[in-house]
Image (cartoon, grey):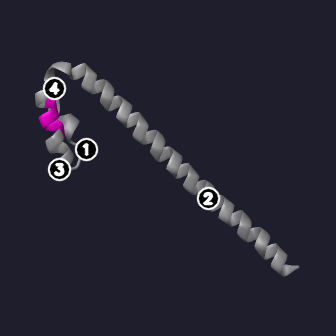
């Protein structure tokens, strides 16, 4: 159980997580809820950044197109 929780983290986070789990092993369900919340938060933030990056590229491309058209005229 603990191994799978710790596998996908950096070393510092792993140490912290294992200590935290040992300290808090009674509230395992609570830990699971927090973990799920953090995961969903991270994915939503990542998705937002990713989409905003794509949006920015699209805007830059649009501006470049308009600018080139004006230069040709």
- List x then y, in percent, for residue 50: 52, 51
Report, in whole angstroms, how far the alpha carbon at label 2 lies from the one at label 3: 34 Å
- Quadrant (top left, top right, bottom left, bottom right) of the N terminus: top left
Q: Secondary structure at mark 4?
A: loop
Q: Secondary structure at mark 1?
A: loop
In primary-sequence order, the first of circles 1 and 2 is 1
User: Is 9 placed left or right of 39 in the picture?
Assistant: left
Q: Which dot, 4 or 2, sits closer to the camera?
A: 4
**Quadrant of residue 21 within the rendered picture:** top left
Report, in whole angstroms, how far the alpha carbon at label 3 lies from the one at label 4: 19 Å
Label annotation for residue 24: 4
Q: Residue at x 40, y 41 (%)?
A: 42
Q: Residue at x 50, y 45 (%)?
A: 47
User: Is 23 placed left or right of 68 in the picture?
Assistant: left
Label annotation for residue 8: 1
Residue situated in front as seen by the camera: 36 or 24: 24
Label annotation for residue 56: 2
Residue interval drawn in magenta: 17-21
- List x then y, in percent, for residue 31: 25, 26
- List x then y, in percent, for residue 32: 28, 26
Label annotation for residue 11: 3
Answer few, some or many: residues within 10 Å of disc 1's Cα (few below 14, many 20 plus, some between 14 and 19): few
Q: Which dot, 1 or 2, sits closer to the camera?
A: 2
Instruction: In the rendered view, tell whether residue 4 sits above or below residue 13.
Output: above
């Amino acid at each position: 159980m603990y191994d799978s929780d710790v596998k996908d983290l950096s070393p510092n986070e792993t140490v912290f997580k294992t200590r935290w789990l040992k300290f808090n092993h009674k509230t395992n369900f609570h830990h699971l809820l927090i973990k799920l919340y953090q995961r969903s938060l991270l994915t939503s933030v990542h998705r937002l950044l990713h989409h905003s990056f794509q949006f920015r590229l699209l805007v830059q491309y649009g501006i470049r197109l308009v600018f080139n058209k004006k230069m040709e005229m």
